[in-house]
Amino acid sequence: MQWIHEDDLFRRLADSTVAMAFIAPQNDIRPSWPLRQLAALIPRAVFEEVPAVDHNLRANDPQIWVDVITRACRAHIDDPG
């Protein structure tokens, strides 16, 4: 996790041309605002909040997890930028 301490981390993210999806469960125990901020900072990023799911989405709701991840991947394949 050394990369998190690099002084130019946010500059490089803001300059990134890589498509990114930030996905948060609506009922997560952690706040979603850091992910929202990153999605707003990065030019080809999107933020999605998955309604009515808890923190451990992948374990508790595996089919919703598959649907969300599949949709996110397809969106970036269909619109490679």
Image (cartoon, rainbow, N blue to C red):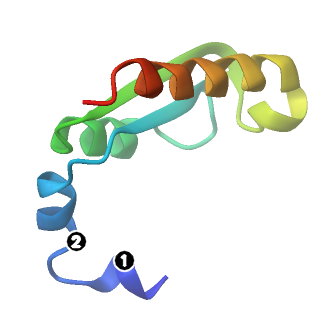
Q: Earlier in the sequence, mark 1 or mark 2?
A: 1
Q: Callout 2, which amino acid?
A: Leu
Query: Left of 79 or right of it: where is 9?
Result: left
List the single residue furthest toward the bottom. 2
- Whether residue 19 is visible here, answered yes or no, is yes
- Residue 30 in the image: state x and y as whole percent: 55, 43
Image position of 34 (left or right of 15):
right
Q: How many marks?
A: 2
Which residue corresponds to mark 2?
9
Question: Which residue is found at the position 42% from the left and 27% from the top?
Answer: 76
Q: Residues within 10 Å of mark 2 (few under 14, many from 20)?
A: few
Check the image and report above or below for 6 versus 23.
below
Q: SS at mark 2?
A: helix
Q: Are there few (<14), some (14-19), or many (20+) residues within 10 Å of tag 1? A: few
Of residue 51 and residue 75, the one placed in the foreground of this image is 75
Q: Which residue is mark 1?
A: 4
Measured from the top left, where is residue 75 in percent x and y? 45, 19
Tell me the residue at 30%/47% (across/down). 18
Looking at the image, which is closer to me, 79 or 27?
79
Q: Residue at x 76, y 24 (%)?
A: 66
Residue 13's tag is none
Relative side of 74 to 34, left or right: right
Badge 1 vs badge 2, beta-carbon distance below 8 Å: yes
Which residue lies at the image location 21% right of the left edge and 44% below the top edge?
42
Q: Nearer the viewer, residue 70 or 28?
A: 70
- Residue 61 in the image: x percent, y percent? 85, 23
For mark 1, give the secondary structure: helix
